Amino acid sequence: MNLLQLLVSNSPVVKKDPVDEPLKLVLDAEKLDEYQTNAGIGTESPSSQRYTWEECCDFLDFDYNFTVHNLVTDENWTIGNLIFNPLSECYPQRVKGFADLPVVIHEDGRRDAGVAVIEMIRTPLSELSFWLSQAFTRASWDEYWEIYSEEPYFVKIPLDPEIKCIKILPEDENENYMRVCVILDDGREACKMFFYDDDVDFEQDKDHTFTGDCFDASILVEETYVKITYPGDCS
């Protein structure tokens, strides 16, 4: 619910008043058109709208679809990146969330009644983004190893065979972030930022070919060192 309140109160699609202050629960139809077209699914070369959306409204540990329905004109807009199979048996502990709120949609001088809905779910992409960020945070934080553990930190991320490969790309606009992309067998792609520290040694083991009904990507963290193993053949 907190994320939905942010989206309808202070996101790029909220209508502004004459002094450029956001009007809570009033959404701008032109901005909904713009961001639905340009900001939904992150790509390897994201648009300026996608960057803006990520800085405002993209949480690392969840992916979501944000849908707005105009109750007067029956129009719908969706901004989101849920491209994965939510029913896959490879994700037995998938965490989900759902919420809705009444909104006003400002369109062509009218103010129409509407409803905003958010469907949140942990996906392979959000898990990769979250755990990579956690890995670099731990590896770059000296006190972590002194306080918590001297043992390596290891996590597995379940993946479904619908995932063909994973790419990790440098971030163009922010040196503190990189971008992880997941490509499905049908060619669809979604990308997401994660925290990165260039003082940490980063190894990518992407030569593995995983077989079977389900498989894992894995992340290993030691002091000043992060290693990720994942399927990397995107040819």
Image: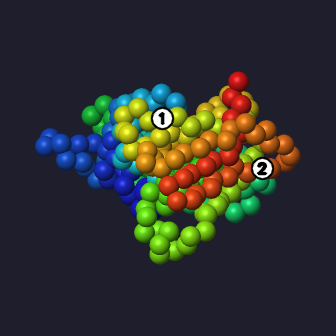
Q: Amino acid at mark 2?
A: Phe
Q: CA distance from mark 2 to mark 1?
A: 25 Å
Q: Residue furthest top?
A: 235
Q: Residue furthest bottom?
A: 147
Decide which of 91, 120 is in the foreground and name it: 91
Tell me if mark 2 has few (under 14), some (14-19) or many (20+) residues whose alpha carbon lies within 10 angstroms of its own: some
- The answer to which quarter of the image holds residue 81 is top right
Q: Residue at x 68, y 57 (%)?
A: 156
Residue 91 vertical position relative to residue 45 in the rendered view, above or below: below
- Numbered disc 2: secondary structure: strand
Q: Amino acid at mark 1?
A: Pro
Could you tell me how many numbered marks the image carries? Answer: 2
Q: Residue at x 65, y 34 (%)?
A: 183
Residue 169 image point, x, y percent: 52, 34
Residue 215 is marked as 2
Direction from residue 104 to residue 119 in the image, left or right = right
Which numbered disc flags the more N-terminal residue, 2 or 1?
1
- Name the residue beneath numbered marker 1: 170
